[in-house]
Amino acid sequence: GVSDDNNYFVFEDILNDCMSAFSRDPWVCRNAMTPSQANDKLYTDAERVSMVYPPCGIVPFQGMVLFAAPLCYIWNEAHEMYFSMRAFYSQYCCRLCTITSREGDILQLSRQFETLLQEACPELVFHLCEMGLPPLKIAFNWIFFAFAGYLEVDQVLALWDRIFAWDSLLIVPVL
């Protein structure tokens, strides 16, 4: 977790407050580019809007705080960091956390990674597969968390800046 990370442990209280607010914020459920599928089987369409649990519509998962942690280096105020994280999650990260076939979602990004690696380094792909280690198994968490927790903070922020600039996650599997 972030409490064990040298880059983020000083922000642990702010991040706990941020993630607590996030889990209780129904705005996320209403505005996510790719809605969570966590409550699809529980409610009808009419009930889903008012009866989603947790209110944000996203069942918390290990590492979710990594979508907020790098933003602590940008904002001085917790509420500014929270609203930035909420917008970033709703616009981009939700697409990494929900399995759909839409363009720019996690399945397409995973396929793009595999295709690019196969074209650039077919010998490496063959070698890894022979060892019983598919390349996507190594890289999936990198893609899933948009490299947060895997690269240095300044590098993560530079990558995220490019995501914002191009309004696309397609750069993530290219790295």
Image: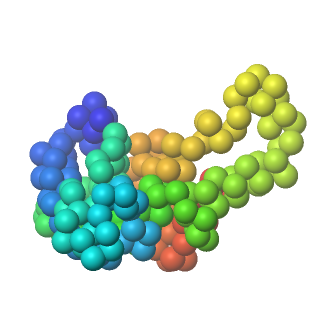
Q: Is residue 171 visible?
A: no
Residue furthest right in the image: 123
Instruction: Find residue 139 and report its horizontal and vertical position in percent.
Output: 60, 42
Residue furthest front in the image: 44
Residue furthest top in the image: 131
Q: Give the total number of marks visible in the rendering.
A: 0
Query: Taking 51 as reference, is 3 above or below it?
Result: above
**Residue at point 34%, 40% (across, down):** 62
**Residue at point 61%, 57% (across, down):** 107
Query: Taking 169 as reference, is 167 above or below it?
Result: below
Instruction: Find residue 82 and report its horizontal and vertical position in percent.
Output: 20, 64
- Picture quarter containing residue 157? bottom left
Q: Is residue 166 left or right of residue 148?
A: right
- Picture quarter containing residue 72? bottom left
Q: Is residue 116 left or right of residue 122?
A: left
Q: Is residue 149 left or right of residue 132?
A: left
Instruction: Find residue 35 and report its horizontal and vertical position in percent.
Output: 39, 68
**Residue at point 33%, 74% (across, down):** 45
Query: Taking 126 as reference, is 132 above or below it?
Result: above
Instruction: Find residue 15 and report its horizontal and vertical position in percent.
Output: 19, 50
